[in-house]
Amino acid sequence: EGQSACRNDNIMAFRTTFARLARHDVGEHLQKVWKSHTPTEGQIVRHLSPFEQNIGSAFFKAYPAELLKNTTEAAFEIVPAFLVLFGIKTWADWEFEQIAIHHRD
């Protein structure tokens, strides 16, 4: 009988501990999620609904200016590379033709 009385006392002690830790401002199904939540004091949290957000229109309004800016920035690197590539291709075609008709002499 001594062991069962001690066991009941331990169970009762844990019941009171859990009752003190439980939150009463949220539903029982949310208690586990909200257990680790720390409230933010003084912070204002706002959001826009998806219907108030204009995701695509900003892209299409800024696209021409962004394209022009990116093109002018990249032109100094891309144009010389294409000129070198075009020169090599032209020379290689000319050299191929020279090799092809070289044996006719």
Image: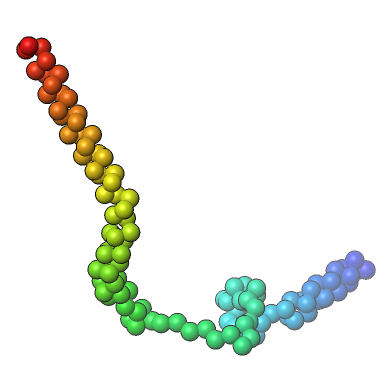
Asked whether residue 8 is in view, the answer is no
Residue at the extreme right: 2
Q: In which quarter of the image is the N terminus?
A: bottom right
Residue at 29% x, 72% y: name it: 62
**Quadrant of the rendered image containing residue 26:** bottom right
Residue at 45% x, 82% y: name it: 47
**Quadrant of the rendered image containing residue 57:** bottom left
State left or right for residue 12 relative to residue 23.
right
State left or right for residue 96 relative to residue 11.
left
Residue at 24% x, 68% y: name it: 64
Residue 68 place in picture, x, y as percent: 26, 64
Residue 79, compared with residue 34, is above or below; it is above
Residue 97 place in picture, x, y as percent: 12, 24
Residue 20 place in picture, x, y as percent: 75, 81
Residue at 21% x, 39% y: name it: 86
**Quadrant of the rendered image containing residue 58:** bottom left
State left or right for residue 42 relative to residue 103.
right
Q: Which colour scheme is used?
A: rainbow
Frontmost residue, 31 versus 61? 61
Residue 49, compared with residue 10, is above or below; it is below
Residue 90 place in picture, x, y as percent: 17, 34
Frontmost residue, 40 versus 92? 92
Residue at the extreme front: 105
Frontmost residue, 26 versus 74? 74
Asked whether residue 85 is in view, the answer is yes
Q: In which quarter of the image is the C terminus?
A: top left
